[in-house]
Amino acid sequence: MKSLTTWQMCALLAISVISNKLLMLPSIMYEYVGRDAIFVIIFKFLLAAMFIGVLMYALTKNPDKTLRELVSTIIGDVGYRILAFLVFVVYFFKTFLLLFESELFLGSVMYQDYDKLLFLVPTMLVAGYIAYKGLQTVGRTCEALCGVIFIGLFLTFLLSISELDCSNILPLGIEDFSNYFEALNACFLWFGNYFLIFFCLGDVKMTKNLVGKVYTVFGISTLFVLAFFFVFYANFEYSSGLHKFAISDITQFTPEIASFTKVDWFTVIIWMMTNVLQCAIQIYIMQRTFIETFGIRKTQVFSFIFLSLILLIYLFNPFNLSEFIEFVTVYVSPFVFFVGVTLLILILIATIMLNRRKSKQGGNKKCLGN
């Protein structure tokens, strides 16, 4: 039985596109290419759109085939298990980054006296429970809250552009080409939103205009992120690299928003809701890839085991902010790109092979009928 409706998969994609790009990423990318980070973001989203096209091709041509079934036709079950473990590692770092950014933001900006466990434990319990209930519950939860999240963020965005001076973002296109390449290579861990569609293969109820709906939601989410980056760089100009917490700084340093004392809290609450949902998505994928890697009997208790492991590692984390960001951008992000591209190539080859096999079988049946 199919677990996800088309709109539930679209909601999963929308949450993943916006969740981890509105806090530290704008300032990090500014340090590489300045305001030309806008071009890097556009290129990354175009790349993601192409990758999603491959996944939509696989989904529409073989709607009953899961990721495991597709990839195993090329590299066998052992090869798939190795790749599944690599995806598990990718999502471990994605989840760690999500919690690291969120906890650092709350401890540095929102509270003077702050115990990190008061944030980490409730967040992990809620996210772990959603993931524990399975893919259908994750999809339903994202579908139910996606509209609220986008409306809340959009209202805050509208308030922040009342006195926007677009000339502040000019000139563009002045950075060295090497800087663009470094920025592209360094920030893949914040992207790779198409990864979650890997684990929707074989579980989506096929509906009319599925591809169009997916690209519409992806396009709207992408435009929102691009507009956010544009507003952030236009507001803060040359000091953009100093504003480490973009979504909070926009609300606190915009006079129209600052005059409403509770608006910044509203924005933070909406953003935290997004992160909890994204954490649930990532924990579900970690659970699934771990089970498929080691052939363990399916049990959702792994959701809480992984969260407990991440919590312990986080509490004894030896990195400060600059060291952690350097480690992620230098070592982890290229690894994420490698795993994603490898899976996409295998899925594309497997889909083409299966289609040719079906065509030959259809041709043979016609010959026998004659």
Image (cartoon, grey):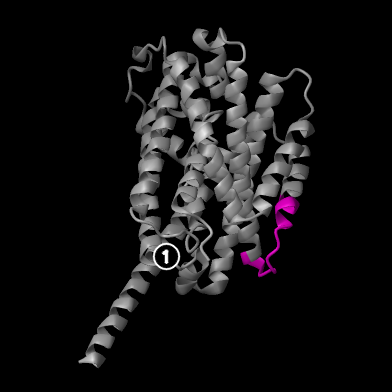
Q: Which residues are magenta?
A: 292-306
Q: Is residue 189 above or below residue 198?
A: above
Q: Is residue 237 visible?
A: no
Horizontal and vertical percent position of residue 348: 38, 63
Q: Tell me the residue at 57%/13% (across/down).
A: 252
Q: Which residue is mark 1?
A: 63
Q: Is residue 162 above or below residue 127?
A: above
* Quadrant of the snapshot with the C terminus: bottom left
Q: Nearer the viewer, residue 55 or 205?
A: 205
Q: Is residue 35 visible?
A: yes
Q: Secondary structure under badge 1?
A: loop
Mark 1 residue type: Pro
Residue drawn 65% across the image and 31% down it: 102
Give yes or no for residue 90 being in the magenta stretch: no
Residue closest to the eye, 1 or 325: 1
Residue at 64% in and 35% down: 324
x and y percentages locating residue 51 in the rendered image: 39, 51
Residue 217: where, in percent of width, then height?
40, 42
Residue drawn at x 45%, y 36% is: 182
Horizontally, is 288 left or right of 107 in the view? left
* Furthest residue toward left: 370
Q: Residues within 10 Å of mark 1 (few under 14, many from 20)?
A: some
Residue 229 falls left or right of residue 269? left
11, 169: nearer the viewer: 11
Give the side of residue 333 with respect to residue 102, left or right: left
